[in-house]
Amino acid sequence: MIHWSTEKIEAFQQTLLAWYDKDGRDLPWRRDHDPYHVWVSEIMLQQTQVNTVMPYYTRFMDWFPTVNDLANAPEEKLMKAWEGLGYYSRARNLQKAARQIVDDNHGQWPTTVAGLLDLAGIGPYTAGAIASIAFGEPVPAVDGNAFRVFARLLEIDADISKPQTRQLFEQVISTIIPADRPGDFNQAIMDLGSSYMTAKNWDSANSPVSAFDQAFLDGVEDQYPVKTKKPRPKRIPYFGLVIQDGDRYLLEKRPSTGLLANFWTFPLIKQETLLARLDEPETVTEEQLVTLLTQKVAEDYGLNLKLTTRPGKQVTHTFTHQKWLITLMDAEWQGTLDLSYFPGEWLSTADFERLALPKVQDKMWQRVKSEG
DNA sequence: CAGACGTGGAG
DNA sequence: TCTCCAAGTCT
């Protein structure tokens, strides 16, 4: 990697901020520097694009105008506000942090990176963003944009997928960030990273800082940043049970930890748990699987069901690390179902509208609805 | 540290 | 359909 002189650093700051003053984006959360506004937007923007966040942010501020409103919000309303955004622990941590501020800190915000890091859901990036934007602390906010922009400007070849690499970038950026406008500087870097210096289809030649962009000058933008790629999602087959009683369906409530924690879905049974009972799982037939499924549902949940499947009942859903392949099964039964051993309840279609449901449940529901 | 943790858009 | 990407944090 290369190094910049003091003169070059000052020229870069001047060029970048002049561009930001002229062409910086006018975003809803940039209309003031209220830490609540900065904070909520930063959490929503984690791993999520600006266009996606926009309507969620507006509605969130309408429903929860202050940190106090958020601290006192009902769980259901909070999750409904986050429905569809994903990474739902962000919403739960948001409320946890709101309660830390309201209950433990008399409604006062920590104003430094060190203090902000004590709040739930706030890591090094978000702490730097809030501290610099809302409180003017001259600290870097190293997100994916900052990694990419500075990796190219200085041809830094450290692997950004390794946690340790963050420190290197923080040190480098600390020597470049201006003491008088750290918040604008960090936001300008993000705007740069999402316009002229994107991961793909960049336009370095027209970037306001092209003269400072060593990777561009050398024609090697495609080599930066260095990042090891992640393994593809693991394919996991499931059975999904459609258990209907009039306009109600039996849904299970997922455990309070892990994927889609606390969310309602049609009962899902991992097919692997059925295969484990076989001597030769490689040669299992569809009929055998249904028999095993019927037994398992009876044993685990105390539900005696007659299960049948039909063509066109396959639903797939891909998460970051898992790909679910769901075979929907219709159920019939005699008398009344005893739910004593089942972790769920009968929910009406009206409940479906009221509750926050994960995308995969919506997919299954749309499929069931369309087939009657 | 490596992996978990959602969803939607682009190519 | 598949891969990669998008203002990361937690364990």
Image: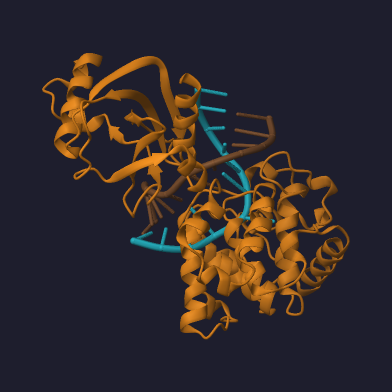
Chain colours: A orange, B brown, C cyan
Residue A230 seen in the figure: yes
**Residue in the image at 42% along x and 32% along y:** A247
Most foreground residue, B4 or A102: A102
Query: In front: A134, or A240?
Result: A240
- Which is nearer the eye, A304 or A238? A304
Residue A23: image quadrant is: bottom right
Q: Nearer the viewer, residue A358 or A117?
A: A358
In the rendered structure, the answer to whether residue A311 lies left or right of residue A305 reads: right
Query: Considering only vertical position in the picture, is A345 above or below A164?
Result: above
- Residue depicted at 85% across the width and 47% down the height: A206
| Residue located farthest toward the left when viewing the structure as drawn | A279
Report which quarter residue A135 is drawn in: bottom right
> In the image as oriented, which residue stretches furthest toward the bottom?
A106
Residue, x 49% and y 67% (percent of image)? A95
- Looking at the image, residue A39 lies above or below residue A321: below
- Classify residue A167 as left or right of residue A241: right
Residue occupying the point 81% across, 63% down: A16
Relative image position of residue A156 (x, y in whole percent): 62, 56
Whether A302 is drawn above or below A183: the answer is above
Drawn side of residue C3 relative to residue A146, left or right: left
Q: Position of residue A291 (x, y in %)?
A: 18, 21
Q: C5 above or below A191?
A: above
